[in-house]
Image: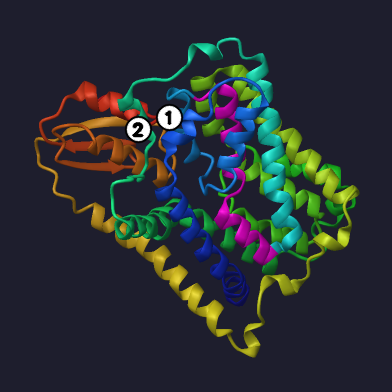
């Protein structure tokens, strides 16, 4: 099992590190306010723009929610917001690179194409049948700052590069690192302990296996990168490539928490289109892969797991794996221990924060609270759903800042 785990890690780590770097550059150098300004109006064009913006962004199905909600509150249409919600969590520059490394170029190309097509279709449907969309136009300048992220055109190039590296190799690793580890462990367990003929029955009926994959994938949470080794292990155990693609598409795209929040913020019709587009798109592209496209494009062998450790470890992938492991340890363990030692006085106020599901959400809430006048210290506990805030500040202003970031807050 350790050999299988190390082999998969060596196969993915160079591409994941490259993806983290590109993701950081996108996050810092592309202003989110510009995104929102281009995503108003009806029809397929805003949905297409939103999907094209969302496909490369490495946000998970819960991490994308604050961004999409902020875009919506800053003038983006419901259709464009729904398209962004559908496209973004399915893929990203990091997961595309990792998909290529483990599953091959065919999967890596079809995956963003499927995300784009389903997002545009879902967003167009929402835009066409949403009669209340014209009520949401632009909003105040202070709302626009809620979605600016780390973009700052006045900072020097070197400062922005440092911010990009910090976001890509610290914040983003902390956001998806846990799920990446879980995905690798599940894949290693499947590869080593599941008999080769375990999935034979489902493998003979791809449609049945796709429906089972949907039932499992829709309610659960897994990030786009963490789903890759699981899909690889399932294919190697006998499931069809189309079934693996259903898992790759539906697993990261939606979960119960994201559906509930979309329903509350954008309405039941938009939520239904959001879920329906993902389900129909996953099944449709899965069937296309299994029945229409050449199977040799998606053929996988045990060689895709990685290099045989008995022949020695390749130098460059091993160095990349060591760097990735070090980043995971820092982001998931050391950084959390450091944050617990924050200087918060006994007079600090506490707030209940709802809607946080991952470290990315936690970072968004922290940044929104820090922007409130009078706040001198803040500690956001993701597990407890609480924020401890120090300093002489206006509670109403703080709650409003958190709301503009896409979450809810109330004082204790």
Residue in the picture at 53% in, 58% down:
180
**239 above or below 120?**
below
For label 1, the residue is 70
Which color scheme is applied? rainbow
Question: On the picture, is 225 further left or further right than 273?
Answer: left
Magenta region: which residues? 76-102
**363 above or below 184?**
above
Residue in the picture at 84% in, 44% down:
287
| Quadrant assignment for the C terminus | top left
78 or 48, which lies in front?
48
Question: On the picture, is 67 further left or further right than 409?
Answer: right
Cβ–Cβ under 8 Å for marks 1 and 2: yes
Residue in the picture at 47% in, 30% down:
36
Q: Is residue 100 magenta?
A: yes
Q: Where is residue 74 in the image (x, y as percent from the top left)?
A: 43, 25
Q: Where is residue 108 in the image (x, y as percent from the top left)?
A: 69, 56
Q: Kindly tell me whether residue 216 is visible in this rendering.
A: no
Determine the residue located farthest toward the bottom in the rendered image: 311
| Quadrant assignment for the N terminus | bottom right
For label 2, the residue is 146
Secondary element type, mark 2: helix
Find the distance from the CA under tag 1 to the CA under tag 2. 7 Å
- Marked residue nearer the N-terminal end (1 or 2): 1
57 or 210, which lies in front?
57
Secondary element type, mark 1: helix
Residue 67: image quadrant is top left
Residue 188: image quadrant is bottom right
């Amino acid at each position: 099992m350790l050999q299988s785990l190390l082999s998969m890690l060596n196969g993915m780590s160079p591409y994941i590190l490259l993806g983290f770097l590109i993701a950081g550059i996108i996050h810092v150098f592309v202003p989110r306010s510009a995104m929102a300004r281009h995503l108003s109006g009806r029809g397929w064009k805003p949905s297409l723009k939103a999907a094209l913006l969302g496909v490369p962004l490495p946000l998970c199905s819960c991490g994308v929610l604050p961004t999409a909600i902020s875009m919506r509150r800053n003038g983006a249409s419901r259709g464009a917001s729904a398209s962004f919600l559908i496209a973004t969590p399915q893929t990203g520059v990091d997961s595309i690179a990792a998909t290529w490394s483990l599953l091959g170029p065919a999967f890596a190309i079809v995956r963003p194409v499927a995300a784009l097509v389903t997002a545009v279709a879902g967003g167009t449907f929402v835009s066409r049948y949403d009669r209340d969309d014209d009520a949401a136009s632009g909003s105040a300048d202070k709302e626009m700052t809620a979605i600016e992220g780390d973009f700052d055109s006045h900072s020097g190039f070197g400062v922005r590069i440092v911010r990009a590296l910090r976001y890509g190799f610290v914040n983003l690793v902390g956001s998806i690192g846990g799920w990446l580890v879980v995905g690798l462990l599940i894949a290693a367990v499947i590869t080593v302990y599941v008999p080769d003929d375990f999935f034979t029955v489902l493998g003979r009926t791809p449609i049945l296996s796709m429906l089972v994959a949907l039932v499992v994938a829709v309610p659960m949470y897994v990030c786009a990168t963490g789903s890759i080794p699981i899909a690889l292990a399932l294919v190697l155990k006998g499931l069809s490539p189309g079934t693996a693609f259903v898992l790759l598409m539906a697993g990261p795209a939606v979960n119960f928490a994201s559906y509930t929040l979309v329903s509350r913020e954008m309405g039941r019709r938009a939520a239904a289109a959001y879920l329906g587009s993902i389900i129909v798109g996953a099944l449709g592209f899965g069937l296309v892969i299994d029945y229409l496209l050449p199977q040799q494009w998606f053929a996988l062998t045990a060689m895709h797991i990685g290099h045989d450790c008995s022949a020695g470890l390749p130098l460059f992938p091993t160095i990349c794996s060591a760097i990735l492991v070090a980043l995971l340890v820092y982001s998931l363990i050391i950084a959390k221990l450091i944050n617990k030692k924050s200087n918060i006085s006994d007079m600090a106020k506490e707030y209940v924060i709802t809607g946080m599901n991952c470290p990315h959400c936690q970072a968004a809430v922290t940044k929104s609270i820090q922007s409130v006048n009078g706040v001198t210290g803040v500690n956001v506990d993701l597990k407890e759903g609480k924020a401890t805030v120090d300093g002489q500040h206006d509670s109403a202003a703080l709650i409003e800042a958190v709301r503009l970031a896409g979450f809810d807050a109330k004082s204790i």
